[in-house]
Image (spheres, rainbow, N blue to C red):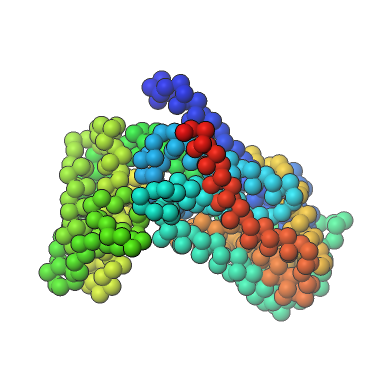
Amino acid sequence: MELAADLETSTLVLLVIGLLIAFGFEFINGFHDTANAVATVIYTRSLRPAHAVVWSGLWNAAGVVHATTTGLVVAFSIVHLLPVDLLVSAGGAAGLAMVFSLLLAAVIWNLGTWLLGLPASSSHTLIGSVLGVGLAASVGSPAGLGAGVNWGKASQVLLSLVVSPLLGFACGALFLWLARRLVRRADLHAPAPTDKTPPAGVRALLVLSCTGVSFAHGSNDGQKGIGLIMLILMGILPATYALNTGVGPEMVHEAVAAIDRMDAAVSEAEALGHTETVDQVTHGGAHVDWRHVRLVPDARPTDSDALRQLLRGVRTALTIQGGLAVIPPADRWSVRASILRARQAVLDYDAHHVDLPTHIQATLRADLEPLTRLTEYAPTWVPLGVALALGIGTMIGWKRIVVTVGEKIGKTPMSYAQGSTAQIVTAGTILLADVSGAPVSTTHILSSSVAGSMTAAGSGLDASTMKHIALAWVLTLPASMLLSAVLYMIAQTFLS
């Protein structure tokens, strides 16, 4: 309530609208993507539809809450797609235009594909929208076209989105092939009957694997919603949300001690001869002094002196009496920017000097964690709100996608073995992605797993459905990028 009282009415209204659209995106994500989690249990009559969607909704919410205990790595993979400085340095109006453009683009594309019954990816949609506004915002920038996107992080994210469905297809085919040889019951491999429930053991496996997919979806996709909301909060209220002001003096002192250890490690590496002087870096054909680089993610120092200077600057900013809350609001964004630059410089230094002794590498990697906790966080109400929106969204709108997954991917309806295989592969793949911090698409992994199991069973794939799914897969990223970029350009026209 204090925050609301301190805000200007216009800012408060924009903040509320932005949050409503963001939570709306998660609500749509619930009935758009999570239909995949309940598709097999509903189609095989393992659970009644009403029971399945409520059960899935609860486990989606549990997955979101669980994600807050594991560091929100996926959430900040989304945030770091943009150099977040861009939202602030662009100016208040332009920053708001970016936020609302990417939100509206994601919602429009998600609703459109849902109305067509296509299992398109909310993850692709959100990531494409973020990249689209980043590109559009860099048009005419002195740093050059594309400077509004962190291409290093974007390449990692895009790779995970491409590889995960291929992995789902391969594992779906392999697991089904194994199931056909290890479990030779004909009723498990025949199309699931529509007039009776599965045998007790099969039913339990289907429900358990549905639970796993729902939990994994909440953990991975819920983090994307958290990252989106933190992007909004930092864009509209940077002074309030730039730093984790809930951090007390003990954690700040721990971060300072970590900086001292990293400083000493870099000095030791230099003394051992593991150095390379890089006074300037090249980006887009132009020489850029690293001290002035803010929006060009490829231009970072890799020499020891520059890295130590960055680390000591952060140390000076953190040598305060009390927690981060005592830092004046006007200074918090610059402190955040310094922490992020120092953190990335350490990662680059480690990657650049591949021959560093093992103990120095271990120190640099381990001691980044205390710094990360100062900037990568979410207030408690954010994951709780995302969990609620995702859980409620799961409970409606599921039928269109269920029919596509259950009946239209293969030339024959889904069997019990195919449904179980697809769900186990999907849950395992998503949870593996969580560990590595990779945002992946539940929709694409499950659809690919079903297709893999159909192929291994010799059921064949429905060419028309697969064409539509593939088209949605291929088009979602560029279409959402284009849509968000156009919306941003339109918004900029009205603002100028």
The residue shown at (64%, 51%) is 33
Q: Is residue 205 above or below residue 125?
A: below
At which x and y percent is residue 385? 53, 37
User: Most extreme residue toward the bottom, as rendered?
Assistant: 181
Residue 101 placement, left or right of 356: right
Q: Which of 383 and 159 is in front in this view?
A: 159
The residue shown at (52%, 50%) is 132
Quarter where residue 436 is shown: bottom left
The residue shown at (55%, 61%) is 161
At which x and y percent is residue 258? 22, 53
Q: Nearer the viewer, residue 45 or 167?
A: 167
User: Most extreme residue toward the left, as rendered?
Assistant: 271
Q: Is residue 62 visible?
A: no
The residue shown at (36%, 52%) is 143
Q: How many labels does the image show?
A: 0
At which x and y percent is residue 206? 70, 59
